[in-house]
């Protein structure tokens, strides 16, 4: 436990005690050290941690009473370590070629939006509530092996971008999710080679298509391209394509640590993007790995990512914290995915939890873990509740 709490840097400076008692205690072993589980930790470079864990620290009862700072909400608000604002939130929006909004059964309260006044009214409502960041996902019945709809100037996402930019201009920051799964007839995130059990995703051929999609979205007016396919080298391919066509100022928010998660289920219904065969475990990350996320993030930053992301958020808050600690200078996003949304909705609908408080607690936990930006389907609800932020805790 202490290994995880203190982080890998401190672990590197620790050494195993020879003949230690093995007791789980924080016994002082001399200046700047302590014992936990038979391991000696040296704290010479971490005076704050010495204060917390040293038996001679100032933090002792009764001179220290943490409850004093919790006596009323005004005190609690004054010393709160974590904040949340509408600037931290990004609203995911599904856009489609329908004539009216289509409710998403697996995600109560969410819709697939047509490219008409209904979409504009919804986005205007977001903007009025203080939400100026949206990320677009295309939903279409036009599917083929190479995701041609995604590279078409008349595709649903480029048309949605143009419509929104014409209506809201610079007051709306448009993130465009970039992947092929919404547009392929097989539902995978890249070009499929082989067949049956021998199929595989051709990484480098896929990168060429990613570059074409990125330029298509940038030309339509997207502010940020958000590649989610987890192909090796995707950020470099997209950065090169954008720069080569004169879009040096279009940002890239990479889904750097995207795990192969069961929590994507409702989204796949919403976007009709489930694989028709196989799964995505050969390209999305193994849920058992955390340090691998640091490698993925380091590669993306080195290739030119402006923002990196961990997805999903709640089951991977440890990864969010690791990434922020390792790359404090890089803006970090976390995605509260469809499964997280639908679980809160289902539990609240059954009367088991208070929906509003669950929403704000979950979003606050993601911020506390280190996320600068949160993609959440609760963005509009959260914006409304933030008007009474000081009374929520």
Image (tube, helix red, strand yellow):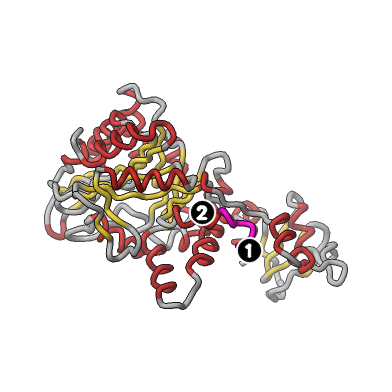
Dot 2: within a 10 Å radius of its alpha carbon, few (fewer than 14), some, or many (20 or more) residues?
A: many
Tell me where residue 299 appears, x and y as whole percent.
Answer: 43, 40
Residue toward you, 25 or 89: 89
Image quarter hosting the C terminus = bottom right
Q: Up-down: is 22 above or below 258?
A: below
Under circle 1, the secondary element is: loop
Name the mark on residue 103: none
Depicted 271 relative to depicted 302: above or below: below
Magenta segment includes 162: no
User: Which quadrant of the figure has residue 162?
Assistant: top left
- Residue where numbered disc 2 is placed: 320
Mark 1 and mark 2: span between their CA atoms?
A: 23 Å
Q: Residue at x 29, y 28 (%)?
A: 219
Task: Give residue 270's quadrant in the image.
Answer: bottom left
Q: Position of residue 362 (x, y in %)?
A: 51, 62
Residue positioned 22% across, 56% down in the render: 272
- Residue 354 percent location from the top left of the image: 50, 71
Q: Which residues are magenta?
A: 387-393
Front residue of 186 and 290: 186
> Where 210 falls versus 85 (above or below)?
above
Q: Earlier in the sequence, mark 1 or mark 2?
A: 2
Q: 105 or 216: nearer the eye?
A: 105
Query: Is the stretch drawn in magenta largely helix, strand or loop?
Result: helix
Q: Is residue 167 left or right of residue 307?
A: left
Please state if 148 lies on the left or on the right of 350 as rendered.
Answer: left
Q: Position of residue 14 (x, y in %)?
A: 67, 58
| Residue at 50% from the left image edge and 52% from the top image edge | 383
The residue shown at (50%, 55%) is: 384
Residue indicated by mark 1: 393
Mark 1 is surrounded, within 10 Å at the Cα level, by few (under 14), some (14 to 19) or many (20 or more) other residues, namely: some
Q: Is residue 294 visible?
A: no
């Amino acid at each position: 436990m202490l290994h995880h709490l203190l982080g890998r840097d401190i672990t590197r400076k620790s050494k195993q005690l020879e003949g230690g008692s093995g007791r789980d205690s924080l016994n002082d072993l001399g200046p700047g050290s302590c014992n936990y589980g038979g391991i000696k930790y040296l704290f010479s470079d971490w005076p704050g941690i010495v204060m917390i864990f040293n038996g001679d620290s100032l933090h002792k009862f009764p001179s220290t009473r943490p409850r004093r700072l919790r006596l009323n909400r005004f005190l609690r608000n004054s010393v709160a370590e974590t904040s949340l604002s509408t600037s931290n939130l990004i609203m995911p929006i599904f856009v489609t070629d329908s004539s009216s909004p289509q409710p998403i059964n697996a995600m109560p309260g969410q819709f697939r939006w047509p490219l008409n006044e209904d979409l504009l009214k919804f986005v205007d409502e977001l903007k009025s509530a203080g939400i100026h960041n949206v990320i677009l996902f295309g939903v279409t019945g036009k599917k083929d092996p190479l995701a041609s709809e995604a590279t078409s100037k008349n595709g649903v996402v480029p048309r949605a971008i143009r419509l929104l930019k014409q209506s809201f201009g610079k007051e709306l920051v448009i993130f465009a999710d970039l992947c092929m799964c919404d547009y392929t007839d097989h539902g995978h995130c890249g070009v499929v080679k082989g067949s049956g059990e021998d199929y595989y995703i051709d990484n480098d051929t896929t990168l060429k298509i990613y570059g074409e999609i990125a330029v298509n979205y940038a030309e339509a007016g997207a502010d940020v391209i958000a590649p989610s396919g987890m192909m090796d080298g995707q950020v470099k391919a997209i950065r090169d394509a954008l720069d080569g066509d004169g879009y040096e100022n279009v940002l890239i928010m990479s889904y750097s640590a995207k795990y192969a998660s069961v929590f994507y289920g409702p989204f796949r219904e919403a976007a009709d993007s489930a694989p028709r065969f196989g799964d995505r475990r050969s390209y999305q990350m193994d849920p058992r790995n955390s340090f691998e996320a640091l490698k993925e993030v380091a590669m993306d930053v080195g290739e030119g990512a402006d923002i990196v992301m961990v997805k999903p958020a709640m089951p991977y808050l440890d990864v969010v914290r690791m990434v922020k600690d390792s790359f404090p200078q890089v803006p970090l996003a976390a995605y509260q995915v469809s499964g997280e949304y639908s679980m809160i909705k289902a539990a609240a609908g059954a009367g088991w939890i208070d929906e509003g408080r669950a929403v704000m607690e979950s979003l606050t936990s993601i911020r506390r873990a280190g996320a600068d930006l949160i993609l959440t389907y609760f963005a509009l609800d959260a914006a409304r509740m933030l008007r009474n932020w000081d009374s929520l805790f």
